[in-house]
Amino acid sequence: MIFTFPNTDQPFTFSPTLDGLVCSVEVRWLAFGRRWYIAVSDPTGNLLVNRALVGSRSPVALTNLTWELGVASADAAEPLGLPVGSVARALVYGCSPGAYNGWYTVRVTGAASFAFDIAQDPGSVVTLGSWAPAVDLVRGYFQTSSLVYWSGRAQFEALP
């Protein structure tokens, strides 16, 4: 589910489904912090999350994805922008089979390549998806859903 950040300096709200609940997300500018913040409430209005808005780099297409002995190796269409040997929390999605999709701690193995652990063989890749070193704005509050703000596209995305 995609929600576009309006071209405004006024607060706005949208309603993503997170862990099966239709939640309310209010995005507002706070002069004290001089930045945007999000407040996520459940359907009854109880505040669940209140934190500064952090943008994530736009997803980059994968050009190769393989699995061997518990490790998935991936190549991206663009340089990762991360030092070789570093680790990052990243989102892999849009792949088929879907067992490749998810949040991982990835190890940067080259300028445009990384690896991550997947215990069970997900099978041969049918569709290559995308990856991004992303920030899940609701991590720790929801079990299966994520909320990411793609700053380059000025869009929020609720996954799944």
Image (cartoon, grey):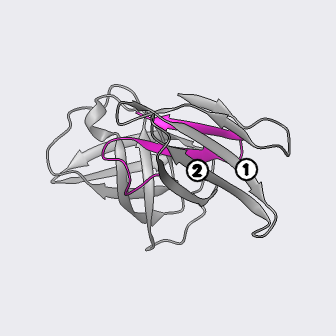
Residue at horizontal 59 percent and vertical 30 percent from the top: 2
Q: Which mark is residue 69?
A: none
**Considering the numbered disc 2 on the image, is that residue within a helix, a strand or a loop?**
strand
Task: Please state if 90 lies on the left or on the right of 151 as rendered.
Answer: left
Contact (Cβ within 8 Å) of mark 1 with mark 2: yes
Density class for disc 2 (Cα within 10 Å; few <14, some 14-19, many ≥20) is some
* Amino acid of disc 1: Arg
CA distance separating discs 1 and 2: 8 Å
- Image quadrant assignment for residue 80: bottom right
Residue 37: percent from left, percent from top: 66, 56
* Stretch in magenta: 138-160
Residue 11: percent from left, percent from top: 76, 43
User: Residue reaching furthest right?
Assistant: 8
User: Toward the viewer: 150 or 35?
Assistant: 35
Residue 84: percent from left, percent from top: 48, 71
The answer to whether residue 122 is seen in the rendering is: yes
- Image quadrant assignment for residue 160: top left
Q: Answer above or below: position of 24 versus 51.
A: above
Task: Please state if 116 lies on the left or on the right of 2 as rendered.
Answer: left
User: Toward the viewer: 19 or 109?
Assistant: 19
Q: Residue 28 carries which label?
A: 1
Question: In the rendered structure, which disc, 1 or 2, sits on the residue that comes first in sequence?
Answer: 1
Residue at horizontal 38 percent and vertical 32 percent from the top: 95
User: Toward the viewer: 29 or 94?
Assistant: 29
Residue at horizontal 71 percent and vertical 45 percent from the top: 152
Residue to which mark 2 is pinned: 39
